Amino acid sequence: MIDVCLLGTGGTMPLKSRWLSSALVRHNGKCVLFDCGEGTQIALKCANFTFKPIDVICLTHFHADHVSGLPGMLLSMGNEGREQPVLIIGPRGTRKVVSSLCTIAPGLTFDIEIAELINPDETFYFNGFTITAFKVNHAVSCYGYRLDVPRAGKFDVEKAKANNVPMALWSRLQKEETAEYEGKTYTSDMVLGEKRKGIRFVYSTDTRPTESLYENCMGANLAILEGMYGADEKESHAKIKMHMTFAEAADIASKANAQELWLTHYSPSMPNPQDYISEAQSIFPQTQLGFDGKTKTIYFPE
């Protein structure tokens, strides 16, 4: 399972009840932060999360409403006693941007590792999940992110017996490990059935509808996509500013057969997003308005 918390839903500038862009995913005690707009560390505290377990920070792009909270966040992580390295993933130029921001966050108690994205899509492998960065279409270089938690097949006793797998190795092979016994190698496929459906989460803001966004949202359990503008008459403005409307985000989720869509990154000129949700739900009924602190636990399907 994974825990998802939408920390900030504002675009461009915060409102009294709306922090800037950020979301957190937790899996097996490891936390991934997507974007870090101003106020993110306050939003984390309000949602009852702590800073220390954040192992990976994924930046979509370098506009201030997505990165300006980074120095304070890193300082707070250090103040909570973090010593393990933190990986920051972002577009080309991430090293320079992070270095500049960290001039006001000196003396960190942990190292920062940087992974700059060069290709249209790149995948990073972690213990128990993967993160795929995919390029989207904004005024500056911008990426969306897909997090996948795979799920092994069920343990098959009859298959293990048929393959003469020693019972002493069953537990290790069930964990998808490889084991040696009396000069012979045993692999997990000798005791497991077909892989089962895992969990897919997508986070993407600041983009026009793109094929890459559609492809990466395919079958997602939850997609958090920007809805900068609610009204359809704002579509021409959205095209100029390289953003999406509620309806365009809902159309992506519908065509990609996602299970659920949360809208985020609202324009400050739209104080009441609920006024426009019905049209998006007519396109994709599983559309929900995101709000600061909105949380959900996503379980593996039975």
Image (cartoon, rainbow, N blue to C red):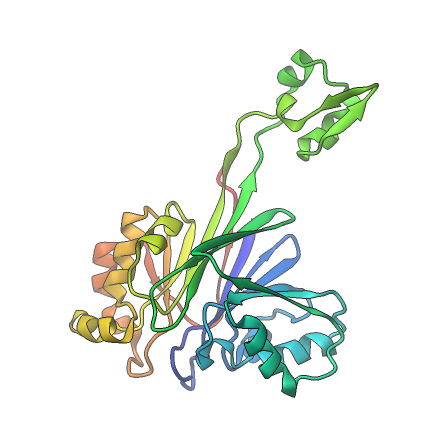
Q: Examine the rendered structure and indicate whether residue 251 appears above or below residue 205.
A: above
* Outermost residue to the left: 233
Q: Position of residue 34 (x, y in %)?
A: 51, 66
Q: Position of residue 75 (x, y in %)?
A: 67, 80
Q: Residue at x 36, y 57 (%)?
A: 261
Give whichever of 25, 102 is nearer the camera: 102
Query: Position of 1 compared to 144: left or right?
Result: right
Q: Position of residue 166 (x, y in %)?
A: 77, 19
In the picture, residue 186 is in which quadrant?
Answer: top right
Q: Residue at x 41, y 63 (%)?
A: 204
Give whichever of 165, 60 is nearer the camera: 60
* Outermost residue to the right: 182
Say if residue 37 shows up in the picture.
Answer: yes
In the picture, residue 70 is in which quadrant?
Answer: bottom right
Q: Residue at x 54, y 77 (%)?
A: 40
Q: Examine the rendered structure and indicate whether residue 299 appears above or below residue 47.
A: above
Say if residue 285 shows up in the picture.
Answer: no
Query: Position of 148 compared to 135: left or right?
Result: right
Q: Position of residue 173 (x, y in %)?
A: 70, 29
Give whichever of 130, 61 is nearer the camera: 61
